[in-house]
Image (cartoon, rainbow, N blue to C red):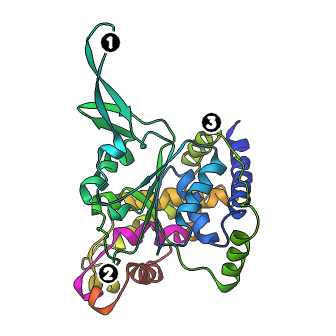
Amino acid sequence: MNDVELFEELARTRKRLLEQIGRVIVGQEPVVELMLTALFAQGHCLFIGVPGLAKTLLVSTTAKALGLNFSRVQFTPDLMPSDITGTEVLEEDRATGGRALRFIPGPVFTNLLLADEINRTPPKTQAALLQSMQERQVTVAGRTHSLEAPFQVFATQNPIEQEGTYPLPEAQLDRFMLSIEVGYPSEAEEMEIVRRTTVGEPAEVVPVLDRSLLLGLQSLVRRLPANEAVTRYAVRLARATRPGPDAPEATRRYVQWGAGPRASQHLAVGARVWAALHGNEVPSIDDVAAVAAAVLSHRVLLNFQAEAQGVTPSQVIAEILRGVPRS
């Protein structure tokens, strides 16, 4: 396909994915739209919400609709780094009597990795994902193994206040392109959930694209144009989260550390993908604003004053969005 055909296919693929995911997942349209943005931007995605909101089901359903290799790791306090990356074992050749090390790949060797309840394991094991998320490769026993493209991590996280959880290191949080808050369904949606899950067989999900098409669509969005105004607005938003004399009042009052340059990159790319998924070749300021909260909220470290007053990162980002000039 040429770029024009790929662009037209992107909108059709979005529609088919929404249809297949909607056969299993009730509501959560904003969550699904942001997830697809991360998917086509080749970014990693963190879903935050209390247990029972179908975060795991959403990721596994998406994997089925994509027709990709899929692995799921249930993070627990006793999980070891080798349980994720793999390990080398010593094997003996019975014919020759010789011995050799053989690498047994872990679940990270897949296309879409579901890191379920990622904050229930200690930081040492969480860090096992850092290299794979940033470099798309894994080093075990001094040997580096490449991961097949596409490789993306979709992780779920329980609220940090719950017992038995560990905060994710800032370096790992920054690897996630988007952090998506998953809320409770409405009453009507919850009624539909109960009807679907207590009567009859679960709905079947069929793949709507293959690996080669997904790679083509992911490559396309990087070639789409982005005007100077969109790039400037993305940079201004990221810089507005950093404390300093020129920072917005909400930042000066409540933020200890702000977002780094990777946030500017993800804002620009996320806006481009969001626009393309909705049929627009060139992103606008509104497209940047649509992804801003998901890009920035997990990259803002609040100070003690914010915690004492119950101020959340989302509230700070909302104030920043209202205060940063759009032109």
Q: Give above or below for 52 relative to 104.
A: below
**Percent x, y for residue 84?**
36, 46
Farthest residue, direction top: 96
**Segment tinted magenta in the rendering:** 289-306
Q: What's the amino acid at mark 2?
A: Thr
Q: State the SS at label 2.
A: helix
Q: Earlier in the sequence, mark 3 or mark 1?
A: 1
Q: In the figure, residue 273 lies in which quadrant?
A: bottom right
Question: With 108 as the anchor, is 6 left or right in this view?
Answer: right
Q: Residue furthest right?
A: 200
CA separation, marks 1 and 2?
A: 66 Å
Q: Residue furthest bottom?
A: 309
Task: State the count of labels.
Answer: 3
What residue sits 66% from the left and 73% below the top?
A: 27
Residue depicted at x 29% and y 31%: 88
**In magenta stretch: residue 303:** yes
Q: Amino acid at mark 3?
A: Ser
* Residue position for label 2: 251
- CA distance for labels 3 and 2: 43 Å
Residue designated by label 3: 212
The residue at which mark 1 appears reads as 94
Examine the rendering and report whether any part of residue 284 can be seen: no
Please determine whether, in this image, residue 316 is positioned above or below residue 127. Answer: below
Report the quarter where the N terminus lies: top right
